[in-house]
Amino acid sequence: MKVNRERKRLYVGGLSQDISEADLQNQFSRFGDVSDVDIITRKDDQGNPQKVFAYINISIAEADLKKCMSVLNKTKWKGGTLQIQLAKESFLHRISQRTSSSVLTVNVKQRRQQLRSRAIQERNG
């Protein structure tokens, strides 16, 4: 019987600063085929790491996704407590999914507003 795997993007929060892509690859490959790992470190104004999280692209069956979530979510691992959930759709992805006409409409409205503002400034200045 062939298992139906879907490509999912997972958000993994609560990571320690010394986590590696290989660590995440090994941990999540038990549940599916990991194709990509992006580790993101947010820093404060002085450049000190404050928050480390990752996005993992994985081809995974629904049953294995549920197992992954139940086994790993809220567990302590390598100095952090994992927080795992399906990643929210990114802003850039939402924009690219819109039709070109709606994006064009937004650009035209913005341009009209800029021209109006410039005309008012020239009149008053």
Image (tube, helix red, strand yellow):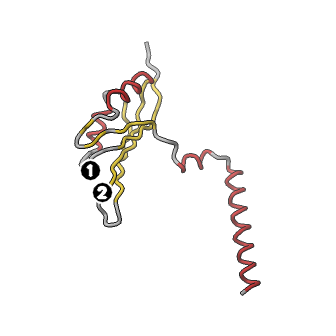
- Can you identify the residue that label 1 sits on? 17
User: What is the quadrant of the C terminus in the image?
Assistant: bottom right
Residue visible at 40% across and 43% down?
A: 55
Residue 19 at x, y percent in the picture? 26, 45
Lateral position of residue 99 relative to residue 81, left or right: right
Which of the two residues, 25 or 69, is positioned nearer the viewer here? 69
Q: Answer yes or no: do the residues labelled 1 and 2 have beta carbons within 8 Å? A: yes
Residue 122 at x, y percent in the picture? 73, 83
Regarding mark 2 in the picture, which secondary structure is present there?
strand
Q: Disc 1 and disc 2: Cα gap in Å?
A: 7 Å
Residue visible at 72% across and 68% down?
A: 113
Type of amino acid under label 2: Pro
Residue 20 shows in this picture: yes
Regarding mark 1 in the picture, which secondary structure is present there?
loop
Type of amino acid under label 1: Gln
Residue 118 figure quarter: bottom right
- Can you identify the residue that label 2 sits on? 49
Residue visible at 52% across and 43% down?
A: 89
Using the image, determine if residue 64 lies above or below residue 100: above
Q: Residue furthest top?
A: 1
Residue 88 at x, y percent in the picture? 49, 42
Residue 31 at x, y percent in the picture? 35, 27
Residue 15 figure quarter: top left
